[in-house]
Image (cartoon, rainbow, N blue to C red):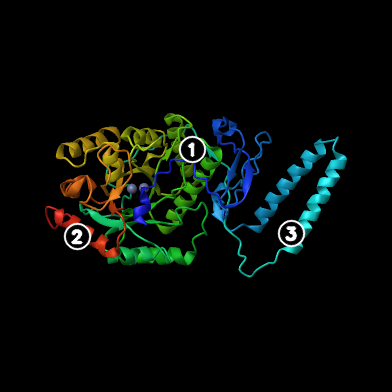
Amino acid sequence: MASKINADVEEPVLRVTRGSKRKLTSPIIKHEDGETSNVAKQSHKSLHLLSSTKLELLQAENSGVQICEKNANSVTSHVPNPTKTLKSKQTVKQMDKESHEKDSQGNGKQEKIKKEKKAKAEKTDTGKKVSKNDVPKPVMVIPEIIIPSNKPIIKREDGPSPWNGTVKYDNKIFLGAHISAAGGLENAITNSLNIGGTSFALFLKNQRQWVSKPMEDVTVERFKAACATHNFLPHLILPHGSYLMNCGSSDPVILAKSRANLLDEVQRCERLGILYYNIHPGSSCGKGTREEAIKSIADSINWVHDQTPDSKVTVVLENMCRQGNTIGGDFSDLAEIIQQVFDQSRIGVCLDTCHALAAGYDLATAHGFDSFLEEFERVVGFRYLVAVHLNDSEGELGCHRDRHASIGKGKIGLEGFRRIVNCPRFRDIPVVLETPFISDEHYKKEILLLKSLANSDTVCA
Ligand SMILES: [Zn+2]
Ligand SMILES: [Zn+2]
């Protein structure tokens, strides 16, 4: 689980070979100023889709029909609504019909196609045995994406968390780990207590699938009740987003799916009463410029903010290790994304210590740590820091490789972590281990080890 958190999404993710091969058309991404994004100008692509994924793209580049739903608030991934599915099928039928009607020369051919289609449909209707276990698979529906532009900038207030008014700041470090929520999201709380965590990270759904079942109300209630009982406040929980997302992609299909997923997960956080939602910013995959990828990431966040205007959920950008074309290895990448986000009260940063060392920030020495803090404050600003991923690094300083190691077993070392644990900059935020998962007992020991590095008993919550 945590040991698998090393993967950067560098390549487009639709390389899965299971499932059917379909030809998809490019979705047009509209901007509020009337322009369409250049991603729509790409040629059509044939892609292998996940077998569990049905991407409802009705878009033809010149038809002006948008993908897919007009009411973007109501949909991302869900079990298909029969009315909506019917409507979609009708739209496809209508488009088919119109295109055939235009073909005035092809009447005979048209009849033949119709007969073939009818025969095929009859065969399917009668030939398929319907099993009781045939439950409808969740369908990914991409809402209409209109990128907002020229909105007033909302600045972020100074302070460790924007969750003002409800949280008493203790000036303590809240140590925890990325823990399993298998069997129900509420199990994350029990698992976290078992390892002695006072904060935690988790996946809200399968991190390697585009679509998941919607959360049931009972799950939401149990999760919130468990958090309240055991005093896990909203700003101490840090869900990690899907690995499939790449909001910096120049591939219009991956971009549209990434944006739909981003919205879905932010809405899940909102329902669960969680404040923060951590993502890898994205990658240009070498197919576009860094500037284009950065703009695309900021556009994605702006769009999600627009879709969730009453939400406090903050999208948290994780620093990366400069591997390949990933965005976020340099603090200036993070700063540029933040500058292009209109509501800066809902954007934050999570510092991953392994990624930082691999990116070239020397957390192993006192001087390196000081320059790391100084550069972060100067380029991004600590008012944006809302979480830390605490990992040692198997790879050397500046290796650009994402290889997490257990605390004290890598190139940062115990002295490096002693500085981090005692640094007042990392108080009142989740500081979670993503070190290789060995056992719960091992996580417990790592947390105790970190606590033993604190200069006094009062530092740790
Ligand atoms: Zn991560
Ligand atoms: Zn991380």
Q: Nearer the viewer, residue 19 or 37?
A: 19
- Mark in front: 2 vs 3: 3
Locate the C terminus by quadrant: bottom left
- The answer to whether the residue labelled 2 contacts the one labelled 3, judged by CB atoms less than 8 Å apart, is no
Residue 38 lies left or right of residue 271; in this view the side is right
Q: Report crowding for label 1: few under 14, some 14 to 19, many 20 or more residues within 10 A (C-alpha).
A: many
Q: CA distance from mark 2 to mark 3?
A: 61 Å
The residue depicted at 38 percent of the width and 66 percent of the height is 187
Q: Earlier in the sequence, mark 1 or mark 2?
A: 1
- Mark in front: 1 vs 3: 3
Task: Provide residue 425's location: percent of width, then percent of height.
Answer: 22, 45
Q: CA distance from mark 1 to mark 3?
A: 37 Å
Q: Earlier in the sequence, mark 1 or mark 3?
A: 3
Q: Which residue matches tag 2?
A: 448
Residue 249 disc label = 1
- In the image, residue 45 sits, relative to residue 314, either above or below, namely above
Q: Amino acid at mark 2?
A: Leu
Q: Which residue matches tag 3?
A: 124
- Whether residue 423 is visible here, answered yes or no, is yes
The reply to whether the residue tagged 2 has its Cβ within 8 angstroms of ligand 2 is no
**In what element is the residue under mark 1?**
loop
Q: Nearer the viewer, residue 432 or 120?
A: 120
**In what element is the residue under mark 2?**
helix
